[in-house]
Each structure stands twice: as structure tokens, then as C-alpha cells.
Amino acid sequence: MIQCNSQMNNIELIDNGKKSWEWAYSHMGIMNTIVSENLTRKPLEGLRLGLSLHVTKETSVLIIAAIKLGSKVALCSANPLSVQEDIAAFLSSKGVKVYAWKNETDSEYLDNLNKVLETSPQVLTDDGSNLHMMAHNKGVHYILGGTEETTSGITRLKALEESGKLLYPVIGVNEARTKHLFDNRYGTGQSTISGIIKLTNILIAGKQIVVCGYGYVGKGVASRARGMGAIVTVLEVDPIRALEAYMDGYQVKKINQVVDKADIFITCTGQKNVVRNEHFKKMKNGVILANAGHFDNEIEVEKLFLNSKKRYSIRPYLDCFHIYGRKILLLSSGRVVNLVGAEGNPPEVMAMSFANQLLSIMHIFRNYKRMQKKVYSVPENIDSNVAKLSLKHLGISIDKLTVIQKKYAKSY
């Protein structure tokens, strides 16, 4: 087994990672059900699985499940700052080829992506599609298929598909209803606010918070911020989403209408340069900038560094910039604040996301010869099964259509 960090053999770290895995596992019962239902036939027997995911306790539940079903696994981080090193050490002790550690440099991050590809994975599971993109840039042809966790990643893969350059079939797990309706909204909504509070310990009540973007992540962040007493304004470029935010009771404005009033900006768009240098010049003193999107380009961070007269770290991942006669505070270096500042999404919602991932990996390994080189949605039977399993583990029963109702639904 390749060891990529001196901490990988740290017995105390491994033990802490095991305890964290057990904690997440106890809150992700549907993963255990899926493994139990498939354990005897080992549907992933012989599969080499390459993953680029946030190395968290929830991710460890997915990986151990894949191993139990027969897969060999190589793992790198989807973000240089999101690695929980006790989990990395624990997974390494279980035979996973782990290429991840906290605070990787950009070059180390890219090198670790490459090391996963050097293990000749047959299926890639990605969060943001950097691993998929590297595989395509290298022209790798041994990959049977892949899955993608995020909106941003699916956008990149669909661009490859539209240009005729996609090399293998990919299932866009983020498009599953049991993923984006719950993980993005309830999971990221809660963990984003948690990350901001952990890094700053500020009071949310009464703060003027601007949420940039009203997709599922933005909806979750806005809802949780308002629930804690914040005065929330939403920024949008899509008229339907802007109207929805307004009907949900939020102020909807242009950024220039609120740039000098906001206490906190939270970007959730998947776009580039949402909060820019031109806005830094107008912001109030002490404003806080946080990003909940996957990539670190939603806030124009390089301009903060370039134009600040003075900068320093108040505490880890809370940086102060003296710029244009004011102080601007940046959280988690402009990277995903819920994973850098907090621990990422709660295990209860990640259970649904990773159940979709695991079942989609099984689907690809079983059906890749019949699949085209395109981006697929999660099969409806998988999505529906995840919802049913989740209800069962929550102890919730629902009614069924009667025979008459079934006939009525098909009548015309």
C-alpha cells in the first residue's frame, strides 16, 4: 500500500478515524441496508474505483461499503483544505490508497489527482469533475464510466458531451431528487452557517446577510440564516429563481443595492467572480465573505491579495485584509466554507447522496457496455429506492394508491 503522509501510520489518528467512521455509520443506516442486500453476490468484485471526494467521516462510510462489495479503492481529496486526516489514516489502514492530507498546495493537489489515475481506475467518482477533467486531458481510455456529485461538475461534463469529447458514460448523481432536494438544501444550508459560526463565533441574529444564488444550496443557506434571525437578501440572475426567492419572503436586489450594507456575503452560484474587486471598494468595514460553492473562484480572492495594503490571519481560515480603507474578512481562503470551517454535510443527508453514488457505481459496472458516452441522470428506480429506504429508516410509513386510483391515474 502506498503511504502518502507520515501521519498515515499514527495509531491514535487511525483510532480517532475509526470512531468518526462509526459515528457517521450509525447515522447512515441505508448504506448498511444496501451493503447487506448485496453482500453475498459482491457486485463490485474486481472493480478498481478511483475517487476524488471530500475526505470526511461520511465519505469513509461510502468507501468501506464499496470495499465490502468487492472494490479496490484509490482516494484523493476534492479540495486541498477539506481533508480530515484521522479519516485519511483510518482508510489507509483499511487498504485504501489514500493521496490526501490537510492543507495541500495546489501542485500537491494536482499531483494527488494524477496518482489516483496512475492506479488505473475503471470507474471514477468525482466531486467537481477535476479528476474527470484530468482523465480527459490525458486521454485515458481504460475508464468504463463515472459518477459526479456536484452541479458544477455536471456542467463541465455536459460541455464535454456537447462537444463530442466525453470519453465514457457518467451518471450525474447531483441530479437525483434524493440528492439535490436534501443534501444541497438541508445539508449544505446547515453546514454553511455552521462553518461561518465556527470560524467567527459571530451572532447571526440581526445580521444583514446577502445570499448570492437561489439554487438548492442558496435556498438552504437563506432558510437557515433567516431561521437564526438574519435579515436575508438574495441576489439572482435567473428571473424564475428571483421570483421564487421573492415569493419565499426574501428581499431580492442587485448587488450594488446592498454592497455597502451587508454584514456577510455568502456565494452559492457555481459562477466566477460573483463578488469582485469593484464591490470591495464599496463594502462596509468588517464585512465577512464566505463561499459555499464548489470552486474557489466565486469571490475574486486574487484581487484581495493584490490590492490589500496589509493582511494577516486572525485564526486558521479567518483572514483579514486591509483594503481600500476598510477591513474585509475572508473565510476558508474563499473555498467551501462548510467543509473547511465545519465538517461538511451531516451524515443523515449524506446517506442519501452516497446511497445514490454507491448504487450508481454498481449500475455503471454492470451496464457500461450498453451505455453511451453521455451524462445520464440517476435511474429512477435507484432514486425511488433511496427515498423508500430513507423513509423506512426514519420510521415513516406512507399510503399506496388503491386499484381505483391507479386506474384513474391512467385514464384519459
Image: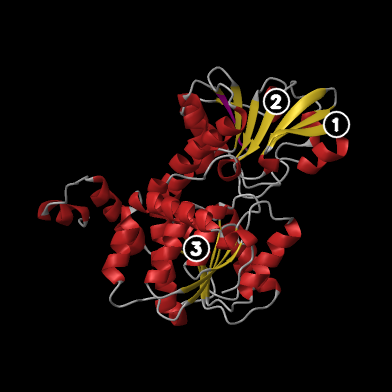
Q: CA distance from mark 3 to mark 2?
A: 39 Å
**Location of residue 280 with respect to 343 vertically, above or below:** above
Between the C-alphas of marks 2 and 1, the distance is 16 Å
Q: CA distance from mark 1 to mark 3?
A: 41 Å
- Nearer the N terminus, badge 3 or badge 2? 3
Question: In terms of sequence position, does the residue under pointer 2 or pointer 1 come before the other?
Answer: 2
- What crowding class fits label 1: few (fewer than 14 Cα within 10 Å), some (14-19), or many (20 or more)? few
Identify the element where label 3 is drawn: helix
- Element at label 2: strand
Q: What residue span does the magenta drawing correspond to?
A: 232-236
Q: Quadrant of the N terminus?
A: bottom right
Q: Label 1's element?
A: strand
Mark before the other along the chain sequence, 1 or 3 = 3
x and y percent of residue 94 in the render? 47, 67
Q: Is residue 188 left or right of residue 34?
A: right
- Residue found 20% across the figure and 56% down from its top: 411
Residue for badge 2: 287
Display colour scheme: secondary structure
Query: Where residue 181 sits: x, y (%)?
Result: 42, 46
